Amino acid sequence: MQASDLGKEKKEANAVSPLMDIKNLSVFYGEKEAVKNVSMPIEGNKVTAFIGPSGCGKSTLLRTINRMNDQIDSAHYKGEIMYDGVNLLDKKIDVVSLRKEIGMVFQEPNPFPKPIITNLTHALKFYRTKKSEIQGIVETALKQAALWDEVKNRLNSSAQSLSGGQQQRLCIARALALKPQVLLLDEPTSALDPISSAKVEDLIIELKKHYTIAIVTHNMEQAARISDYTTFMYNGELIEYGETSRLFTNPKEQRTEEYLTGKFS
Amino acid sequence: MSNINHSSTSSSTHRLIKNKNGSVKRNELRGKVVVYSCAALIIIATIAITLFLTIKGLQSFIVNGVNVGEFLTGLTWSPSGEGDVSYGAFPFIFGSFSVTFLAALFAAPLGIGSAIFMTEIAKTWGQKVLQPVIEILVGIPSVVYGLIGLTVIVPLIREHSSGIGFSLLAGMIVVGVMILPTVTSISADALKSIPQDIKDASYGLGATRWQTIYKVILPAAMPSLATAVVLGMARAFGEALAVQMVIGNSKALPESITDQAATLTSIITLSMGHTTYGSLHNNLLWSLGLILLVMSYVFIIIIRFISSRRKV
Ligand SMILES: Nc1ncnc2c1ncn2[C@@H]1O[C@H](COP(=O)(O)OP(=O)(O)O)[C@@H](O)[C@H]1O
Ligand SMILES: [Mg+2]
């Protein structure tokens, strides 16, 4: 009786509160405000796309979520990113655990110049994963990234011998090996040819069953194809956020419509 | 309006065919001649020096009948006596190599460490303060290092050992400090050239800064770091003045690191002025020079080998 009550409560709580809640977030590089007072949710087990012209702050926003911007001396921020009851921007957050839980894949495929297998085990070793478990984790991650069949016989050859698309899927596998909750993808297909892009897109749709995905993309068709929610940003501001199907067919803001119809880019 | 310029370009046969006797062609030729002669000059100079040194360096073996094995392994050096002459250069070869390796042993960890500090830990401070300081250190003449060694290091060693201070150890420290800026600045360049991409990849996986440095940055930079150390060693091997000022220049094989020693370069600079051209002693010094030349070729081959592996 009590247990089911609790379960119900939890479900209701999930229904109202998203996995992540960005509140009044501003990000600065020195004086320059690259993200301006953005508030939006990121829903669990959904794909949230960020679109907007180049330089509008999409990458900056994404890199703030897993605190990659801490790497840049001039970067600082205001506001909150609430996740599981904590503010990710809090000084007390352990960025190592944070980045393990919120993985990231970058625009250019950036495998380590090492064997394929080492790319996956690299980070596992930091977390003192048991040797007996590593083999299984590697295989699962490569299968999830739809790369296993292509590389299972050459795990010891250099990651740089892979094609661009394979390298990018390797980078996704590398992030998945840490069993993250959230994946942040920053234009993961922009450096890839159309066939490789399609493979990565299929992969993203597949992955959303198990992961929450935030993806920056330059490509509006791609956002329309794979995302559940879309955020349109312009000049650091969030112009419009909503369900992808609605935002693309019936944008509320004029600037969204202009962007979607190609009036500017 | 529509046929602007078309008249002047009407015959495409003329426009696109190579112009045989234009002034453009003459200028092109002039540039080519200048550049090619510069390149030729350098190549000729290199070949000439190598040939000259080889011929001079082999004279003692061919003309004076010096035994090569004895020259390379013999322990006594007294080539200018009237009666019994001996020409064992091993103590100097040993001295050169030990100064070089000990100096590298000293400079490699310090230099690579400071390069990491400059490029990864304190970037702004490293770039604004450390980088210029190191550039100044590279440019200080070696005699200044020698003087400092003479007034600081030699007395220090004298106080803390049974020796007189002039020693292999003093040579190693002076040369080590001297090549440190070279090693540091080349290492820093190597570390800076590691793409931000793979650093991001590592940080993005939750690696700490040290894990990223050890597991990603250092392995990726290893060939260039090795090149930095070998270049430092090449400089150490050829250094004459500073070493000569602090090493003691004893012609006997040193028994410990605080013993006096000599190197190929220090013996050449010390003795060359007192010998007559064409004498056995003089020819032997040229042979020592030949060893230096061979070693500098060896260093170049090592560096080539390391950098060819980097491309894989
Ligand atoms: N490291 C940085 N230092 C200073 N300014 C930066 C840095 N990175 C990005 N910016 C600036 O912040 C703004 C947003 O950049 P970014 O987030 O990369 O845009 P997007 O990913 O949408 O193309 C741009 O004007 C860019 O010039
Ligand atoms: Mg971007």
Image (cartoon, coloured by chain):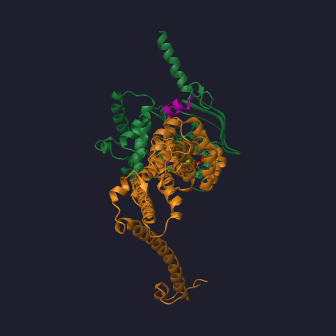
Residue A180 seen by the camera: yes
Looking at the image, the residue that sits furthest to the right is: A31
Residue A193 in sight: no
Q: Residue at x 35, y 62 (%)?
A: B66
Residue B306 x %, y %: 41, 53
| Residue ranking furthest to the front | B83
Given residues B309 and A9, the one toward you in this image is B309
- Up the image or down, A24 lies above or below B281; here it is above
Q: Residue sitting at 55 percent across and 36 percent down?
A: B161
Give the colour in which the image draws chain A: green
Total count of labels: 0
Residue A99's x, y, as percent?
Answer: 52, 34
Q: Nearer the viewer, residue A47 or B281?
A: B281
| Extreme-top residue of the structure | A1
B1 or B39, which lies in front? B39
Q: Quadrant of the N terminus of chain B?
A: bottom right
Horizontal side of A22 relative to B269 (left or right) equals right
Residue B171 in picture, x, y percent from top left: 53, 47
User: Which chain is orange in the picture?
Assistant: B
Q: Is residue A3 magenta?
A: no
Question: Could you tell me residue B93's position as x and y percent?
Answer: 43, 53
Q: Which residues are magenta?
A: A94-107
Residue nearer the viewer, B156 or A59: B156
Residue B239 to residue A64: above or below? below
